[in-house]
Image (tube, rainbow, N blue to C red):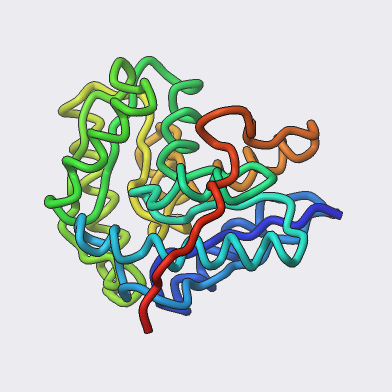
Amino acid sequence: MTRIWVINPNTTEAMTAAIERSARAVVAPGTVVTGVTSEIGPASIESHYDEALSVPGVLRAIERGEREGVDGYVIACFGDPGLDAAREAAAGPVIGIAEAAMHTASHLGRGFSVVTTLARTIGRAEDLANHYGMQRFCRGVHACDIPVLDLDTDPDARKIVTEACREAVESDGSDVVVLGCAGMASMCAPISAELGVPVVDGVTAATLTVRSLVAMGLGTSKRGEFAAPLPKDYLTGG
């Protein structure tokens, strides 16, 4: 049995439940997916400030998972907060949803567009595309201007996201759309059906990437940069 934790770096339980459903829907029998809500941090992640405050909660979840024998982890926020630090702390693979979504999209067409939530997050998505070597595939990043938590409560959310995806495809000439928020995971299939292009959700892409790496017996190399942190005293406050 393979155990995968899908870590929601924010503290909103309802979002974790939706993320867990999406991740569970794509795994085969023999894989147990558990959604884990961060114990500390912001209710949603929509800024550099939010992202920085979310990282301690991500690392706390990773440390708990290591004690419980979890095989691999997904970081279910499109900013991939704490990804490098989590890889130092975990024995098995750790995959961020932006990383997985962009790599998956690059297999499906000549170029992709990212549709994210608020306009202030566009720069972060562009930075990640560059960091992951995806700049030659990423043709544009667009915002639908819906706050993260409203994706689950606004009755017009899917319609607004769909129109943002349509405009992105037309303006960028893209073959694929990447949805830039874990809260958009359930929208993939209907948006793809309406627009006639592949639409990639990072939650499912990352979950299957982790499952594949575990099946191959692979984890993050512990030689060099991603070796376990050096033992030392840490002041955590509180």
The residue depicted at 77 percent of the width and 60 percent of the height is 69
Give percent across and percent down for residue 143.
18, 48
Residue 132 image-quadrant placement: top left
The residue depicted at 42 percent of the width and 64 percent of the height is 9
Q: Nearer the viewer, residue 164 or 212?
A: 212
Q: Quadrant of the N terminus?
A: bottom right
Q: Nearer the viewer, residue 6 or 228?
A: 228
Q: Nearer the viewer, residue 28 or 221?
A: 221
Question: Compared with residue 171, is residue 230 higher up or lower down, i.e. above or below?
Answer: below
Give percent across and percent down for residue 166.
24, 39
Q: Is residue 78 left or right of residue 26?
A: left
Q: Is residue 182 left or right of residue 18?
A: left
Say how many tags the image has. Answer: 0
The residue depicted at 40 percent of the width and 55 percent of the height is 77
Q: Is residue 143 left or right of residue 28?
A: left
Q: Is residue 149 left or right of residue 31?
A: left
Q: Quadrant of the C terminus?
A: bottom left
Residue 195 image-quadrant placement: top left
The residue depicted at 40 percent of the width and 34 percent of the height is 196
Give percent across and percent down for residue 156.
25, 67
Give percent across and percent down for residue 165.
27, 42
Question: Compared with residue 212, is residue 34 higher up or lower down, i.e. above or below?
Answer: below
Q: Nearer the viewer, residue 25 or 71?
A: 71
- Most extreme residue toward the bottom is 238
- Most extreme residue toward the front is 232
Question: Compared with residue 195, is residue 64 higher up or lower down, i.e. above or below?
Answer: below
